[in-house]
Image (cartoon, rainbow, N blue to C red):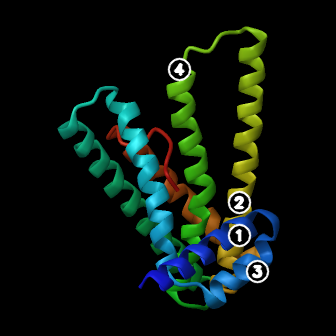
Amino acid sequence: MSDQAVIVLYSFTRNIIGLVIRPYETYRRIVNHGSRWELVPLSIIIGSYLGIASLVKVAAFRPYILTKQFVVLGIAVVITYGLVVGLLWMVGKIVGGKGEVKILALGWAYTLIPTTFWFLATSLLYMLLPPPRTTHPLGIIFSVLFLLFSSVLFFWKIILSYLTLRFSMRLDLFRISIVFCIVIPIVALYSIWMYRLGIFKIPFV
């Protein structure tokens, strides 16, 4: 069991590094040789973020409220993940996609890496440098750097999303564009609903 855990952790770490330096080759490997057990370390990372996010939202050490907030956020993340994977799968099949839904689910899970990094960085910065931020030169520099950081993660997310559909459903760029044109408005409406419920101001997708 311990040997398998080491192998899974090694594969996950190698994939994370590969998604940065060689995303195309890495996604091909994930689709062909990936294991659902690789979702375990990813779940731990996301769970760590949810714990920090709960502390930020509650802003007080109240175990019951913190636990409740953590559970609510966790359920919301799982539902959102399932919804997005389901939509991508259904629309992808409609436009002629091939493949297995479990491969799509694994591939999409890896697109949550930049999402988690962004949310985690935002929560940590909120605690270290809470708003309002000043118009002091250092404050402006910080805002510009954070904007650049967010832009890099956003484009990384786009690349990983494209590669997910490219390899897991064998779609070309045109069909992938159709899929996203259909799925994005639905996810946007869902995100507005989540916002009104007070769960996420920005969707965790």
Q: Secondary structure at mark 1?
A: helix
Q: Residue at x 56, y 36 (%)?
A: 122
Is 41 or 132 nearer to us in this picture? 41
**Would you name the residue on which mark 1 appears?**
162
Taking 155 as reference, is 37 above or below it?
below
Report the amino acid beneath label 2: Ile
Q: Quadrant of the N terminus?
A: bottom left
Badge 3, how many Cα within 10 Å: few under 14, some, many 20+?
A: few
Q: Earlier in the sequence, mark 3 or mark 2?
A: 2
Residue 128 location (% of width, % of height): 55, 25
Tell whether 120 sits left or right of 173: left
Residue 154 location (% of width, % of height): 70, 50
Q: Nearer the viewer, mark 4 or mark 2?
A: 4
Q: Nearer the viewer, mark 3 or mark 1?
A: 1
Q: Which mark is residue 158?
A: 2
How far is the residue under mark 4 from the one under mark 2? 29 Å
Taking 198 as reference, is 17 above or below it?
below
How far is the residue under mark 3 from the one under mark 1? 9 Å
Callout 2–callout 1 Cβ contact below 8 Å: yes
Residue 58 location (% of width, % of height): 31, 30
Q: Secondary structure at mark 3?
A: loop
**Would you name the residue on which mark 3 appears?**
172
